[in-house]
Image: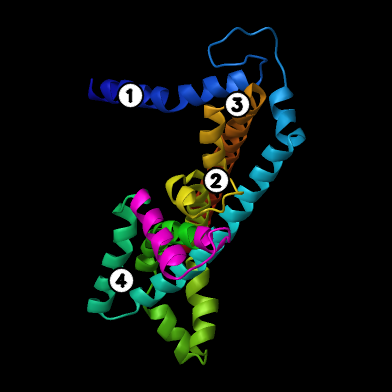
Amino acid sequence: MKKALYGVWLGLVLLVLYVPILILAFYSFTDATMVGGPISSGSLENYANLFKNEDLRSMIVGTILLALGSALIATILATLGAIGAFYSKRTIKGLINTANQIPVVNADVVTGFSICVLLIILFGINKDSYVPLVIGHVVLCAPFVYLSILPKLKQLDNNLYEAALDLGATPAQALFKVVIPQLIPGILSGFMLAVTLSLDDYFITTYTKPSTFDTISTYVVNATKGSQTDVKTALWALSTLIFVIVVIFVVVMNVLSARRKEKNKDEKAY
């Protein structure tokens, strides 16, 4: 009975999460002008508009470049910070962990406004530059990458680094050839999480972006206030593509993780 109730509850949760996305995906392949509106026929015009509309095309490219760039910087900083904290003394480690948790629980609107005040008002950085925007996204993403890498560090054998030093490796060689390769799954997961957070962010982007630049989130909000139907429906197609890409990535990562676990079991059995 309990298993049946758990199954029903899980099914309801999945319905609430995925049915709206599936409905949106369905309407992205039609000529409807609004979700729930009349449908005359199927159409791929919404997907074609993503590439034909210059504003949409430049917005998508800019958003992807921002997400990849800020995620890369955040991943590098978070990886070095996590390794440094892990091998530090207990007091320093506790301080770093606490400091890392503050941006995670802090509201995005507070973070975005604080960065705007600090960089643009106090330091006089040009509002139309991309520096505040990139810094804002790095501040947003780095703590989550840190949290993705930390469990892998805790699973790491503490003797590996010392053994590498005893065998003649320099500290840098031990770090890049022994420690970091063990953290690759956590680093990749953190990087993809950072990309997702950057793509999704609205508040920090709104406060720090140049006036002539839009990401997917800010563009969608502005588009829903306008009257351009073809742009609105093209965004349905964009949402569907993002969802499909995320699903493919998650499936691939799970398959690779399962294969890695099987390989480790076989090596241990051997």
Tag count in the figure? 4
Is residue 221 depicted above or below 150 in this figure? above
| Disc number for residue 255 | 2
- The amino acid type of the residue labelled 3 equals Lys
Sequence-wise, the earlier of marks 2 and 4 is 4
Residue positioned 67% across, 47% down in the render: 61
Quote the CA–CA distance across marks 1 and 4: 41 Å
Left or right relative to 218: residue 12: left
Q: Which residue is mark 3?
A: 232
| Residue 270 makes an appearance in the image | no
**What's the magenta region?**
109-134
Cβ atoms under marks 2 and 4 closer than 8 Å: no
Quote the CA–CA distance across marks 4 and 3: 44 Å
Q: Of helix, strand and loop, which one carries label 2?
A: helix
Quote the CA–CA distance across marks 1 and 3: 36 Å
Q: Of helix, strand and loop, which one carries label 4?
A: helix
Q: Which residue is mark 1?
A: 7
Sequence-wise, the earlier of marks 2 and 1 is 1
- The amino acid type of the residue labelled 1 equals Gly
Quote the CA–CA distance across marks 2 and 1: 24 Å
Query: What coloring was used for the rendering?
Result: rainbow
